[in-house]
Image (cartoon, rainbow, N blue to C red):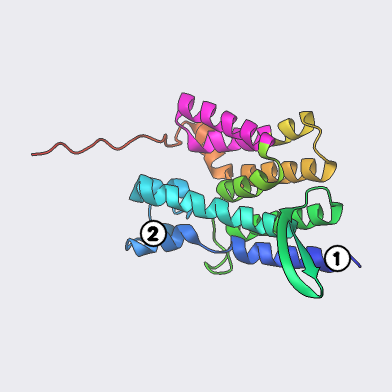
Amino acid sequence: MSIFLPIVLALVVGYLLGSLPFGYLVARSKGVNIFEVGSKNPGATNVRRVLGRGPGNLVFCLDALKGAIATGWTLVQVNWHTVEGKLSEIQLGFSHGDPARTQMAVAGLVGALLGHSFSCFTKFRGGKGVATASGGLLVLMPIALIVGALVWLGTFFSTRYVSLASILAAVAMPVAAFFLHEPRLLLGLTVVIALLVVIRHRSNLQRLMNGTESKFVKKPKETAK
């Protein structure tokens, strides 16, 4: 059986999942059009800046979840067991060793990233793909993702720049994948993701070089009168 059609299917399903505009929907439920406030980006960082920790964390989790689902469903393996022609047991598991399924998983994640960045539901506007990529990579390369997460945390807490932390974490992923001897396909995937994250953050890079990028600062609590 040709792998072409399954890969196309994974790409399309991934795109539709990735296109779900959770940042826009969560903000809209609070009466805010996220495309008109803050950085005008529907990602978790802008939602958190505008609406607070709760909505921001919710958007991050939902965006990561759609990346994980777009990647993970292709790896699900279903085994049917019958006794005397009758179904007796269903076993579910993940298949990481099948090259065809791995190709589908990569296609699913790429589709999700494209959908998140260029959503068909919001006139092809979208976020920068960090949370969605994290969800997919958690399924495919959890150790490499942990390395990227540590780089993000170290950069963020030392500089308070979310954009710089995201860029360096994305760049750290291919390095980690290389030293972890991940398959070439997955190594190539991390390179593509890193390029996409850097390109989507090009305006942030310009502001970082100009010294005008905004740091993430906690809003002071209002004192009771």
Mark 1 sits on what residue? Answer: 4
The image quarter containing residue 181 is: top right
Q: Residue furthest top?
A: 158
In this picture, residue 129 sits left or right of residue 43: right
Q: Earlier in the sequence, mark 1 or mark 2?
A: 1
Q: Is residue 118 at least partly visible in the picture?
A: no
Q: Which residue appears at 79% of the width and 52% of the height?
A: 102
Q: Secondary structure at mark 1?
A: helix
Dominant SS in magenta: helix
Which quarter of the image is occupied by the C terminus? Answer: top left
Q: Under tag 2, what secondary structure?
A: helix
Three-letter amino acid code at disc 1?
Phe
- Report the side of 161 relative to 131 (left or right): left
Check residue 27 in the rendering and tell me which mark sits there, or answer none.
2
Residue 147 drawn at (x, y percent): 64, 31
Quadrant of res 110: bottom right
Amino acid type, residue under disc 2 in the picture = Ala
- List the single residue furthest toward the left: 225
For residue 125, which numbered disc appears in the image? none
Q: Is residue 123 found left or right of 34 in the rendered image? A: right
The quarter of the picture where the N terminus appears is bottom right
Range drawn in magenta: 143-172
- Alpha-carbon span between mark 1 and mark 2: 38 Å
Neighbourhood count class around disc 2 (C-alpha, 10 Å): few under 14, some 14–19, many 20 upward: many
